[in-house]
């Protein structure tokens, strides 16, 4: 009986114990469930924040450069280290099809805004996009990024026609998905100088006219030969408004009169071609030819000269004051004429890949600022041919070094009778991310 | 003397160009498509057994990763389960001044994976587009049970992700589509989730139901079988590609020629893909 009672009490206490264990287990499970739900909630908030952050992308590059100026007469300084470019580009894709881009340039003593634009992509046909803001003008050499370009600087012609590379306006691009064709049409202010860091004048247009640019490129592929050819045409149609001068010097340097405030032409057309050939590791031949008419507006400068008079000087508390009395002044204002010029120019690049890491580059470019006159009649408007030889070594995707020798050769005439020695040897290291 | 120096310099440069262009590489690096990784590993394994002096290193990461590696020079061959994008080709042009070389090396049917218990018998391209874009949210809308559709998909560096989006979904993926790293992970998820749906290479379909797919409501639905893929009747048939920066030479050319030979194509069939011809 005692044993039976003992057994019964044992069973009852075990049951009670197991009931307590089950209850505490349930409690523990419920507790963990709540914690997991709380983590879930936090994670989904964090995930949503992280998704927003992944829409922001940063890229950039720094170009540290050494130049040696092989000039005559010898300049001071004859060589220098400097930061050619230091860019940081932020891209934010707000929603699929809408992108914001901001890219300042942080070169020493010259902080400037390079790109600031929004792109709206057509989500239906995936063909069209509209750009608005400050962006590269639609030209091959302009749009070819400085971080990718095989030579250190763009050709003289492109730097003259498109100063600062960028312009403010709107652009329509068509890039059909299954057709190797690209079309660009831009409406721009047309007066961008690239000097905005210094005078801020590029921020808005300075006249009522707007300029138009168009470019179309078609790509041909011959995969069996390892050959690709991109062929394109481009054009610029715009104007510049006269301000102070009512005179226009035309291309033959003949003087015409014009109403102050009238518009002078800026219009040109060009053709471009890029050949790519998979021969002994890849090579390319790229070129562009542009001809047309460009205009510049006259400038007005005023100088004041004081004549005669007597100086009297007083000093008080360390401050010296000089007063000139009984003097007269002459004010001279010089207004130069507006100019229209027929110009032409071209560039040709030859690029040869040697293995995976080396590249040999030869570039030849020409710019004739006044194609209507030559020899002595051209005076200071001489043409330049520039030969550039460069070698590049890619350490990896992010780091490369370039050695370059640029040899400008000028037209000779009575105003410039000799070849000007102004060659430049450069070494540049570029780090990109 | 000056002329001799110029001649010697020019000759040295020319010899360097030719020598570096033809320098053989004892090691072949293959990176890219996760869809193709088991196939690429099998190819490498079989080839290295026959050619013990050659080392072939294969890694996945996705078609996008492989093509980026090709552009930055860290791989010899990029495997891709989608065609190269125009933007990638522009980067190849800019870096290597070539268009790249595209070699179709096998065929695949992008398979729709359903849980074995899912009663849905077939799906059209339009229905798949609706499901993966989030317009169709419940299985009952496509002949299944009254339950929410759980979407499984790939990360955006995947060629399969891009191919499926461009050719089937033709819109943005639904925001609730779960991103998984590889077709094997998708198959695993669908296996455990009776309301799940996934997509991926035909070679991975084990333990899940392959859903027949039809071009439109009036067409016949087809399974991704060898015959249907060879004849292109399966609506989501695609080529698998190898991309190179320049024309293959030496050891790399021999390897690619072997992959395209009957022997190499037989390996593709054994792994679960389909011959390119």
Image (spheres, coloured by chain):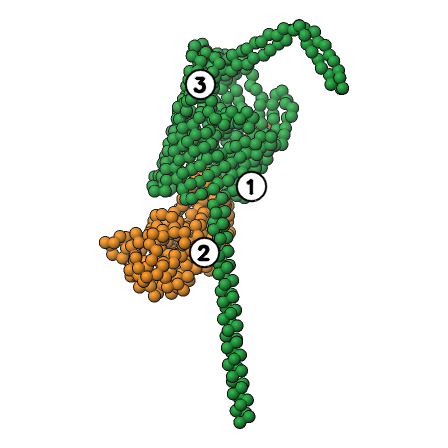
Disc 3 versus disc 1: distance between alpha carbons? 45 Å
For mark 1, give the secondary structure.
strand
For mark 2, give the secondary structure.
loop
The answer to whether residue A328 is visible is yes
User: Residue A105's x, y, as percent?
Assistant: 54, 34
* Chain A representation colour: green
Disc 3 versus disc 2: distance between alpha carbons? 60 Å
Dot 1, crowdedness within 10 Å: few (<14), some or many (≥20)? some
Residue drawn at (44%, 56%) of the image? B180
User: Residue A379's x, y, as percent?
Assistant: 51, 13
Discs 2 and 1 carry the same chain letter: no
Q: Chain of mark 3?
A: A
**Which residue is labeled 1 in the image?**
A399
Residue drawn at (32%, 62%) of the image? B145
Total number of numbered labels? 3
* Image quarter of residue B100: top left
Residue drawn at (38%, 48%) of the image? B172
């Amino acid at each position: 009986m005692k044993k039976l009672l003992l057994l019964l009490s044992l069973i009852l206490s075990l049951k009670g114990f197991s009931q307590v264990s089950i209850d505490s287990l349930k409690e523990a499970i419920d507790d963990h469930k709540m914690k997991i739900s709380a983590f879930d909630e936090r994670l989904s908030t964090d995930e949503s924040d992280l998704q927003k952050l992944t829409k922001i992308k940063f890229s950039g590059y720094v170009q540290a450069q050494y130049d040696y100026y092989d000039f005559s007469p010898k300049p001071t300084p004859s060589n220098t280290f400097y930061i050619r470019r230091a860019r940081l580009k932020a891209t934010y894709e707000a929603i699929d099809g809408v992108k914001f881009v901001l890219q300042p340039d942080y070169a020493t003593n010259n902080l400037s805004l390079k790109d600031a634009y929004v792109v709206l992509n057509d989500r239906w046909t995936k063909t069209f996009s509209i750009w608005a803001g400050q962006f590269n003008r639609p030209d091959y050499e302009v749009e070819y990024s400085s971080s990718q370009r095989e030579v250190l600087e763009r050709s003289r012609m492109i730097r003259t026609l498109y100063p600062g590379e960028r312009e403010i306006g709107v652009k329509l691009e068509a890039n059909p998905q299954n057709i190797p064709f690209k079309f660009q049409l831009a409406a721009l202010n047309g007066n961008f100088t690239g000097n905005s860091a210094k005078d801020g004048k590029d921020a808005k247009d300075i006249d009522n006219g707007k300029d138009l640019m168009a470019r179309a490129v078609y790509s041909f592929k011959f995969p069996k030969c390892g050959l690709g050819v991109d062929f394109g045409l481009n054009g610029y149609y715009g104007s510049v408004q006269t301000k102070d001068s009512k005179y226009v010097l035309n291309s033959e340097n003949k003087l015409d009169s014009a109403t102050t405030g009238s518009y002078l032409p800026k219009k040109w057309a060009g053709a471009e071609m890029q050949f790519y050939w998979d021969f002994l590791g890849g090579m390319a031949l790229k070129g562009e030819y542009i001809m047309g008419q460009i205009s510049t507006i006259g400038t007005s400068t005023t100088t004041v000269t004081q004549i005669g008079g007597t100086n009297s000087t007083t000093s008080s508390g360390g401050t010296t004051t000089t007063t000139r009395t009984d003097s007269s002044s002459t004010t001279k204002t010089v207004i130069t004429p507006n100019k229209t010029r027929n110009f032409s120019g071209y560039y040709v690049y030859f690029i040869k890949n040697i293995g995976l890491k080396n590249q040999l580059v030869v570039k030849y470019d020409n710019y004739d600022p006044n194609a209507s006159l030559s020899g002595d009649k051209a005076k200071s408007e001489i043409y330049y041919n520039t030969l550039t030889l460069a070698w590049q070594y890619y350490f990896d995707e992010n780091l490369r070094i370039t050695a370059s020798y640029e040899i400008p050769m000028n037209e000779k005439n009575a105003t410039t009778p000799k070849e000007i020695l102004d060659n430049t040897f450069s070494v540049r290291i570029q780090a990109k991310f | 003397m000056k002329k001799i120096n110029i001649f010697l310099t020019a000759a040295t440069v020319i010899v360097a160009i030719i020598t570096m262009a033809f320098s053989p590489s004892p090691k072949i690096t293959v990176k890219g498509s996760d869809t193709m990784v088991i196939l690429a590993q099998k190819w490498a394994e079989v080839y290295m057994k026959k050619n013990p002096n050659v080392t072939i290193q294969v890694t996945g990461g996705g078609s996008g990763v492989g093509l980026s590696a090709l552009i930055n020079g860290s791989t010899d061959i990029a495997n891709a389960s989608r065609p190269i994008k125009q933007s990638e080709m522009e980067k190849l042009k800019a870096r290597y001044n070539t268009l790249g070389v595209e070699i179709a090396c096998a065929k695949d049917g992008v398979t729709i994976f359903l849980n074995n218990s899912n009663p849905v018998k077939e799906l059209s391209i339009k229905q798949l587009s609706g499901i993966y874009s989030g317009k169709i949210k419940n299985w009952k809308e496509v002949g299944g049970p009254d339950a929410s559709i759980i979407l499984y998909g790939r990360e955006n560096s995947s060629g399969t992700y891009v191919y499926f989006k461009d050719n089937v979904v033709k819109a943005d993926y639904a925001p609730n589509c779960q991103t998984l790293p590889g077709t094997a992970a998708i198959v695993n998820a669908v296996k455990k989730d009776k309301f799940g749906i996934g997509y991926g290479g035909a070679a991975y379909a084990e333990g899940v139901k392959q859903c027949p797919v039809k071009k439109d409501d009036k067409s016949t639905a087809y399974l991704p079988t060898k015959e249907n893929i060879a004849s292109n009747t399966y609506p989501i048939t695609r080529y698998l590609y190898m991309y190179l920066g320049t024309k293959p030479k030496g050891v790399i050319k021999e390897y690619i020629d072997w992959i395209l030979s009957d022997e190499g194509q037989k390996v593709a069939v054994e792994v679960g893909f389909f011959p390119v011809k």
